[in-house]
Amino acid sequence: MKKEREILEELKKYRGMDLKYEDGRILGSMCTKPHPISRKILEMFLDTNLGDPGLFPGTKMLEEEVIRMIGEMLHNRNPFGYIISGGTEANITAMRVVKKIGKGRKRDIYILIPETAHFSFEKAREMMDLNYRTIPLDKRYIMDVKYLKDYIEDNRGKIDGIVAIAGSTELGTVDNILEISKIAREHNIYIHVDGAFGGFVIPFLEEKYKLEGYNYNFDFSLDNVFSITVDPHKMGLAPIPAGGIVFRDISFKRYLDVEAPYLTETSQATLLGTRTGIGVAATWAIMKHLGAEGYREIVSQCMENTYYLVKRMKEYSFESVIDPVLNIVAIKDDNPLDTSLKLRERGWYLSTCRCVEALRVVVMPHVKREHIDRFIETLAQCKKR
Ligand code: 0PR
């Protein structure tokens, strides 16, 4: 039997192999160092299980309050939802609802998704036999609304859902959900918004950071937006796992419920059964502690650093694919895979885009100016500039 001290020593060795956010070399992640308040909460809520909420009524109340707070942030006074394992589970949950509603129509399910959709939708498609039609992007790399409109008109009555993105994984773009909402209302189509990343950014984005002529509306104030993915464990600063799925109201619960006769509640709506309350409590604490003002400051700092990165790039003639919409920068590169490998050899971790030849930097709160300076110099060396 090993002693606790020995075990901890050994674990420390493994943990020491991991990268650290505070070193500023993680440039491709949508996660960050959780807010320090999370530490105490981890211990306090260690053994909570929201899979059986009757045993943990206090933690369940916290979840309901978090959903109310997120709902308020998204202009919804009457939300229904859960804090779950992440954006993947949230998107799969929304697709379960779209499928259930569509099944009443007794034909195959058709969902329109943009080229920028996260790969979690592919998992949903595989599991649920959904049919997707991919909508191409316009020159701003957002869903081509004209194409979408024509497609829907040519396929009247055959479309069950539209997925729109508020903060795309690769470029941070926001689909024109205002226009999409008008089309969806006319044709009575369900919209699911993937705001996994943008959900905790856009509500706190000051006007001065908004691009002219760009539509940032994405929430429940728009007709036919019936569900939104919004992840506290990304820009919400919560520890993993803390994803969020929010529906317009409780009427959507019936599409998710399965019977669970031997639990303290007789039905269960979430995909996962046993699930921790840690993310719920941490999100509650961080949202209460930071408030809108705190998040606004964090988002502003990330945007300032985003602009700083673009400015430093220009000094070496590196170009960004688009003017940054949120705190993500895509750096044009003729061989992004090769460049990212070279950067990795030098200790910098970032990813590449799929929809365009570019490297991608997510300017999370752990990315500071000094890191940006060192990164740009390394990139310039790699590209011999
Ligand atoms: N929707 C969007 C728009 C996303 O960007 C992501 C993840 C998801 C859904 C899925 O969320 P979960 O990963 O929470 O299930 N986006 C990041 C990505 O795929 C996730 C990530 C985070 C990747 C940290 C790397 C990393 O170090 O790039």
Image (cartoon, rainbow, N blue to C red):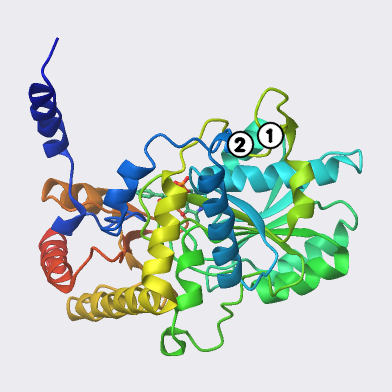
Q: Give the answer, above or below, for where 44 lies relative to 228.
A: above
282 w.r.t. 148: above or below: above
Q: Amino acid at mark 1?
A: Glu
Q: Which class describes the residues within 10 Å of circle 1: few (<14), some (14-19), or many (20+)?
A: some
Q: SS at mark 1?
A: loop
Measured from the top left, where is residue 179 in percent x and y? 71, 75
Question: Residue at point 43% right, 51% down?
Answer: 281
Residue 271 vs residue 163, the one in the foreground: 271
**Hey, which residue is sitting farthest top in the picture?**
1
In front: 194, or 115? 194
Residue under label 1, please give it: 265
Q: Which residue is drawn at the image coordinates 11% and 64% (left, top)? A: 384
Quadrant where the image shows the N terminus: top left
| Image quadrant where one finds the C terminus | bottom left
Splitting the image into 4 quarters, where does residue 18 fall? Answer: top left
Where is 385 relative to 211, above or below? above
Residue 323 on image: x %, y %: 41, 78
Q: Is residue 325 visible?
A: yes
Residue drawn at (21%, 54%), measured in percent from left and top?
21
**What separation in Å lies between label 1 and label 2 (alpha carbons)?**
6 Å
In the picture, the disc for residue 43 is none
What residue do we see at 46% from left, 66% from top?
200
Q: Report if residue 321 is visible in the image.
A: no
Q: Mark 2 highlights which residue?
A: 54
Q: Are marks 1 and 2 in contact (CB under 8 Å)?
A: yes
- Count numbered badges in the picture: 2
- In the image, 318 versus 224, the foreground residue is 224
Q: Residues within 10 Å of mark 2 (few under 14, many from 20)?
A: some
Q: Earlier in the sequence, mark 1 or mark 2?
A: 2
Residue 329 locus on image (x, y percent): 35, 68
